[in-house]
Image (cartoon, rainbow, N blue to C red):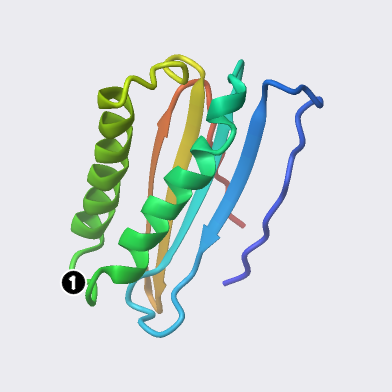
């Protein structure tokens, strides 16, 4: 399977942050690959690192989880950690990102004859999928 990463840079604006993260297993290939695309529009300067913090939480959950038995359960666990992260931001009083966060999580697992693709999106992010 070939994987290509494309970076689309929106018009440069000081209040817009766009990040792409790619997580691939180092040892345990039963996990599959996880991709995170995020955009924070109309952001205040104190939220400039929100996407990096979010990616760090996702990365820690991705790398620390044991061997994967069910891809669906693994993806749900990552989504739960993501929701917990944003719930903590709300409890801290950081609500400036609400309505301005657009993100997509894509999980791809290819194991010979069987492939799994799962994704989750919020905001105005669009996900296009094609196959050869």
- Place of residue 86 in the rendered image (x, y in percent of width and height, measured from the top left): 32, 32
- Place of residue 128 in the rendered image (x, y in percent of width and height, measured from the top left): 56, 38
Up the image or down, 77 lies above or below 114; here it is: above
Which residue is denoted by mark 1 in the rendering? 69
Residue at 32% across, 77% down: 30
> In this view of the protein, which residue sits in the foreground, 116 or 49?
49
| Residue 127 left/right relative to 88 | right
> In this view of the protein, which residue sits in the foreground, 47 or 124?
47
Dividing the picture into quadrants, the one containing residue 25 is: bottom left
> In this view of the protein, which residue sits in the foreground, 116 or 64?
64
Q: Quadrant of the N terminus?
A: bottom right
Residue at 36% across, 69% down: 63
| Residue 106 left/right relative to 90 | right
Dividing the picture into quadrants, the one containing residue 44 is: top right
Q: Quadrant of the C terminus?
A: bottom right
- Place of residue 67 in the rendered image (x, y in percent of width and height, measured from the top left): 23, 77
Q: Secondary structure at mark 1?
A: loop
Residue at 48% across, 34% down: 103
Up the image or down, 18 lies above or below 115; here it is: above
- Place of residue 36 in the rendered image (x, y in percent of width and height, measured from the top left): 50, 48
> In this view of the protein, which residue sits in the foreground, 109 or 74?
74
Up the image or down, 113 lies above or below 56; here it is: below
């Amino acid at each position: 399977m070939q994987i290509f990463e494309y970076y689309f840079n929106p018009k440069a604006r000081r209040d817009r942050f766009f990040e792409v993260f790619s997580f691939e297993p180092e040892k345990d290939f039963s996990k599959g690959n996880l991709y995170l695309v995020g955009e924070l529009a109309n952001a205040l300067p104190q939220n400039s690192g929100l996407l990096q913090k979010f990616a760090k939480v996702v990365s820690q959950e991705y790398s620390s989880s044991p061997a994967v038995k069910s891809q669906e359960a693994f993806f749900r666990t990552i989504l739960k950690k993501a929701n917990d992260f944003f719930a903590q931001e709300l409890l801290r009083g950081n609500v400036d990102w609400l309505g301005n966060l657009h993100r997509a999580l894509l999980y791809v697992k290819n194991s010979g004859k069987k492939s799994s693709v799962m994704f989750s999106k919020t905001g105005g992010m669009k996900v296009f999928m094609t196959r050869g």
